Amino acid sequence: SAVISQKPSRDICQRGTSLTIQCQVDSQVTMMFWYRQQPGQSLTLIATANQGSEATYESGFVIDKFPISRPNLTFSTLTVSNMSPEDSSIYLCSVGQGNNQPQHFGDGTRLSIL
Amino acid sequence: ILNVEQSPQSLHVQEGDSTNFTCSFPSSNFYALHWYRWETAKSPEALFVMTLNGDEKKKGRISATLNTKEGYSYLYIKGSQPEDSATYLCAHRGGNQFYFGTGTSLTVIP
């Protein structure tokens, strides 16, 4: 299975700032995803990162708030912009090779906003 | 069922006990049902991907069944061990949407 390196592993940020999370995979993968888990909530898909084109966002998530890059098949970034305390969550990237294949996750970024 | 629901939300069992929990999901437009184990401070680990009604899968002491017609899956753990303590997540892929449940948090008491 793919080895996924996600960083930072955790951060504490000030309100109004932005943070970029990186996800590096050790092999080329078709699908990369970004998730968020707010305290007490389920793991929620933010967007699918598409190589060479704009990400596909789920309902309730917009590019201005969560810009995503995917310059190649092994790397993606998620930026959390203009952060507020409600953005305090665990953010996870994952990779998959198809709907019927398991997803493999990074270790997550634990983000707290003061 | 419009969303993925898991029950119970949390569970405490004694070492050696067997246990099971439930994942309910929309029965229409079904593609696949995933189970993951998420230990604290680690990444979610894939356990099973199930696609066919009546599927049964097994990995060591953990097994799962799938009923796509009624929209549920059971996860069983036989002879629970402290290292089984984790949150168990199921995820339903239907159409273009992929939804996770809130998980069942299992604590195995030595």
Image (cartoon, coloured by chain):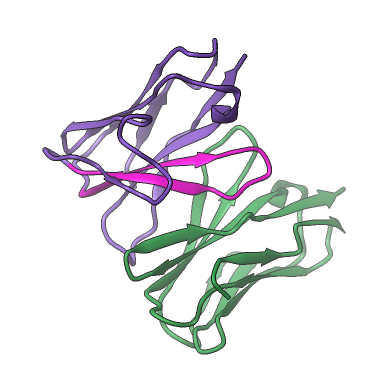
Q: Is residue B49 above or below residue B104?
A: below
Tell me: B81 left or right of B3: right
Instruction: Report which colour depicts chain A.
Output: purple
Quarter where residue A81 is shown: top left
Residue A103 image offset from top left, x and y in percent: 39, 52
In this picture, which residue range is highlighted in magenta?
Answer: A30-50
Q: Residue at x 66, y 64 (%)?
A: B6
Tell me: A106 left or right of B62: left
Instruction: Report which colour depicts chain B.
Output: green
Q: Is residue A40 magenta?
A: yes
Q: Quadrant of the N terminus of chain B?
A: bottom right
Q: Is residue B72 above or below residue A69?
A: below
Q: Is residue B49 above or below residue B44?
A: below
Residue B65 image offset from top left, x and y in percent: 57, 79
Q: Residue at x 46, y 87 (%)?
A: B53
Residue A110 image offset from top left, x and y in percent: 55, 26
Give the dominant element type of the magenta stretch: helix, strand or loop: strand
Q: Residue at x 43, y 46 (%)?
A: A60
